[in-house]
Amino acid sequence: MAHVKAFVLALALFNTDALAQAATEVFIPIGRSPGVSGKTSIVGVIESREPGDGLVVAGRQFFVDFDTQIYLDRNKLRETNTIGTTRDLQIGVTVEVKPQRENERVADWIKVEVTQ
């Protein structure tokens, strides 16, 4: 029984950390997400937009679904980062895309660099 309690506690702590990072991800600049940037995310320029909310970044195709979060990285403007929309996903803009683990082609979140 003690092992079960320890396992449940460990799961609760893990989920709390994951939820905390998800809640603060909007404030983390492109390329600086701990444990994500340079490991599971892709930083590049949007090369093209595809029909059905698809986009190509660094030669890889990603899709935006209902759960995909879009964040505006406004650090270069010295402004607070904020939530964006699919309208912010323009060709030529630098982005960081983190794919969902279950489906590497669907974006979990996308950070869009805002320079003007």
Image (cartoon, rainbow, N blue to C red):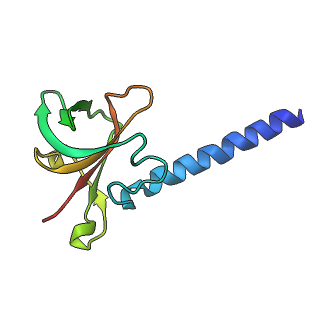
- Residue 73: name its quadrant: bottom left
> Residue lying farthest right?
1
Q: Is residue 15 above or below residue 71?
A: above
- Residue 51: name its quadrant: top left
Left or right: where 72 falls relative to 5:
left
The residue drawn where x is 12% and y is 46% is 90
The residue drawn where x is 19% and y is 60% is 114
Left or right: where 95 falls relative to 91:
right
* Relative depth, front residue between 114 and 66: 114
The residue drawn where x is 29% and y is 32% is 65
Q: Position of residue 8 (x, y in %)?
A: 74, 38
The residue drawn where x is 26% and y is 32% is 62
- Residue 54: name its quadrant: top left
Q: Position of residue 55 (x, y in %)?
A: 18, 34
Q: Is residue 93 above or below residue 8?
A: below
Q: Position of residue 75 (x, y in %)?
A: 28, 67
Image quadrant in which the N terminus is located: top right
The image shows a total of numbered marks equal to: 0
Q: Position of residue 111 (x, y in %)?
A: 29, 51
Image quadrant in which the C terminus is located: bottom left
